[in-house]
Image (spheres, helix red, strand yellow):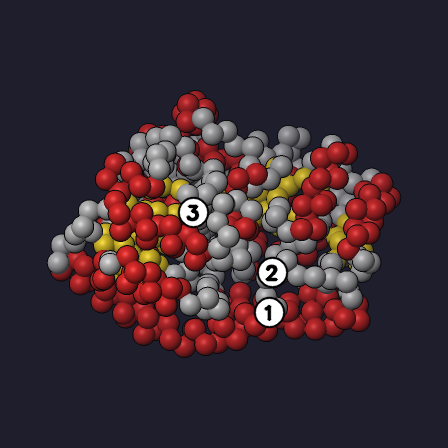
Amino acid sequence: MLQGPATPFFARLADTLLEQGHKVCKVNFCAGDTLFRTKATSVAFNRPLDEWDSFLGELLELHDIDRVLLFGDCRPLHMQAIAQLKQRSIPFFVYEEGYFRPNWITLEAGGTNAFSDLPRDPAWYIKQAKGVPVYADGNTVGGSLKIRAGQDMAYHLANITNALRFPHYRTHRPHGSHIEYLGWARRFPLLPWHERQAQHNFEQIQAHRRSFYLFPLQLDADYQIKVHSRFDGISQAITEVMQSFASHAAHNSVLIIKNHPLDTGLINYRSHIRQLATQLGLGMRVVFIDGGHLPTLLHHCTGVITINSTVGLSALYHGRPTIALGRSIYDLPGLCFQGPLNDFWEKGQPPAKKLFRAFRNTVIHRTQLNGGYYNARGIELAIAGSVQRLTQQEPLTETGASYTGVPSWEG
């Protein structure tokens, strides 16, 4: 096991695999990684970063490693590891947040998101769907922002000792945790007011019977942006979308730009949007909201513009015309608009229902586990699915979650 999420998930998974007779070795890169203790063999990588390749090679041979688990395949240390694993033909399995949230997590062989081996051929999904179950929404995982925040804070508090224990460690995040916490501390007290304002803006648009497009923002530091898109950051994407909207969307339509719920507030998107709207003569046709009920917005919008967020999958679930500006597994003909953004405003079409059903069932069957990382119930489900998936002779060809039924979108 390499680096996992900042929760007890990897530690508990390691202990469960040990109990079933498997050998497990966990690599710790920082003090936070040691916080969640496991009975598995643990080794510390506290050498200079340029020694990581040789350290990993020695570890693979010493313990006769035959598969590797990691959370996120874009972290620099993980990308280096993946390159060596491919050279050695050692299988690796990537955990990530679920494609179909909130009750699913991703466990995929060989890479996730744009690194996924899932085909980009719609006909393949139609064919595959004939042999997989019909998946509903999975067992409810639940969760608590307080639990998640507490685990994150404990993880980063432990990292205060890195200077002594892991002097060469560098976080994959662009800002130190103390800077992010200051941003959240400034933003979160205002969220109830922003939520009411978002609801008011939505009601006003509905009252005037104006069509609107939805552009949900992603996190600026997300590897989905840094690795799997052509944008330097979210501000650049906002500029491109607003310029296209000003020139090519119907004059009576509105563009709602919705902030990400976990945004740190370190970038002032509201100011950027306000200034750009003035320059483009958009006036009140662009609305920035820092809240709002996403399913309601998706249900009523004319179309959705995304880079490669999983909100794009929610938009397809709601039957909304969708365009993906970055690389994503769901950017398929028949699901997402395949033309340029300038044409989307007038020519976007809803996704093909049969194709989306086939796509959803196949992707869940091959890559998703019913569970979560951030509370006891979610971790329990995720471990059960992981063990079943990873201990198969050909892992990740069958699902680790057995909950099936008539999906709500078949109504």
Q: Judge whether 107 appears above or below 212 on screen.
A: above
Towards the viewer: 139 or 181: 181
Tell me: 143 left or right of 240. Answer: right
Q: In which quarter of the image is residue 320?
A: top left
* Residue indicated by mark 2: 173
Can residue 70 be seen here? The reply is yes
Residue plotted at (28% across, 63% down): 278
Towards the viewer: 225 or 231: 231
Q: Where is residue 364 in the image (x, y as percent from the top left)?
A: 47, 38
* Residue indicated by mark 3: 307
Where's the C terminus, which quadrant?
top left
Instruction: Answer with mark 3 or mark 2, whichever residue precedes in sequence.
Output: 2
Q: Quadrant of residue 256?
A: bottom left
What amino acid does circle 1 point to? Answer: Ser
Contact (Cβ within 8 Å) of mark 2 with mark 1? yes
Between the residue at mark 3 and the residue at mark 2, the CA separation in whole angstroms equals 20 Å
Residue plotted at (48% across, 55% down): 233
Question: Between tags 1 and 3, which lies in front?
Answer: 3
Q: Judge whether 180 appears above or below 96 on screen.
A: below
Q: Position of residue 57 (x, y in %)?
A: 82, 43
Mark 2, secondary structure of its residue: loop
**What count of labels does the image hold?**
3
Q: Residue furthest left?
A: 208
Instruction: Answer with mark 1 or mark 3, whichever residue precedes in sequence.
Output: 1
What amino acid does circle 3 point to? Answer: Ile
Between the residue at mark 2 and the residue at mark 1, the CA separation in whole angstroms equals 9 Å
Q: Position of residue 321 (x, y in %)?
A: 29, 40
Tell me: 221 left or right of 66. Answer: left
What amino acid does circle 2 point to? Answer: Arg
* Residue indicated by mark 1: 177
Contact (Cβ within 8 Å) of mark 1 with mark 3? no
